[in-house]
Amino acid sequence: MAKARRRRVRDTWKEKQWYKIVSPKGFGENEIGNTPARDPELLLKRRVDATMRELTGDFSKQYVKLKFQVNSVAGDTAGTKFIGHQVTTDYVRSMIRRGTSRIDAPTIVKTKDGYTMKIHVLAITTRRAKSSQQKYMRETIQELLTNIAADKGFEQLIEGVVTGKVASEIYHKAKKIYPLKRVETIKTKVLEEPQ
């Protein structure tokens, strides 16, 4: 009986180099992680998540998860771009109480500098609203969002969304229609970048 020769497995781990991943300029170019790669080209399009607390040190923003994608590599540093954010589901659940209405208003908007984004705004009323009131509120929020985005550049809009300025602007205008308890931007996604 012939003896099968065992092939020696090449250890690819030793060929890899560690790269430091930094956040975009708008988020202070802080280090958000390290990743190994054999070739810098393989790093491109890799996704990295970071919480707002990790970037700013603000514990009250622990529930905000930011999503970045590696878009450039210089030396051992990988630069990223913002591709979206999301609020944790436990935080969203903690806002909703019995006897209130949850109004979801996902909207596709275009910024002044040509970015197309999907922004999901959640409004919570102080008491239960009729479906016709909810529909009118949803349309109003979507209209407000479209106008806000059209006036701002991508960087300004992202800053406003992540810090909560956009949500508070919508809250102050929309509460005139129906009493609101809270308005929160729970999710964003960059759909298209200008060519």
Image (tube, rainbow, N blue to C red):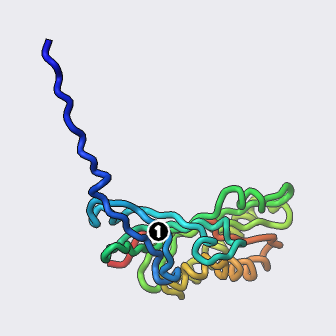
Instruction: Residue 5 in the image: state x and y as whole percent.
Output: 17, 27
163 over 95 or under it: above or below: below
In the rendered structure, the answer to whether residue 55 lies left or right of residue 164 reads left
Visible residue check, residue 169: yes
Q: Residues within 10 Å of mark 1 (few under 14, many from 20)?
A: many
Comparing 107 with 11, the one in front is 11
Residue drawn at x 42%, y 67% as measured from the top left: 69
Residue drawn at x 74%, y 63% as measured from the top left: 132
Instruction: Residue 176 in the image: state x and y as whole percent.
Output: 79, 79
Instruction: Residue 98 in the image: state x and y as whole percent.
Output: 85, 55
Residue drawn at x 43%, y 77% as measured from the top left: 115
Visible residue check, residue 189: no
Comparing 27 with 186, the one in front is 27
The picture quadrant where one finds residue 55 is: bottom right
49 over 172 or under it: above or below: above
- Residue type at mark 1 is Phe
Instruction: Residue 118 in the image: state x and y as whole percent.
Output: 52, 68
In the rendered structure, the answer to whether residue 146 lies left or right of residue 179 reads left
The picture quadrant where one finds residue 56 is: bottom right
**Residue that carries the numbered disc 1 in the rendered image:** 68
38 over 31 or under it: above or below: above
Comparing 80 with 184, the one in front is 80
Residue drawn at x 85%, y 67% as measured from the top left: 126
- Per the image, label 1 sits on a secondary structure element best described as strand
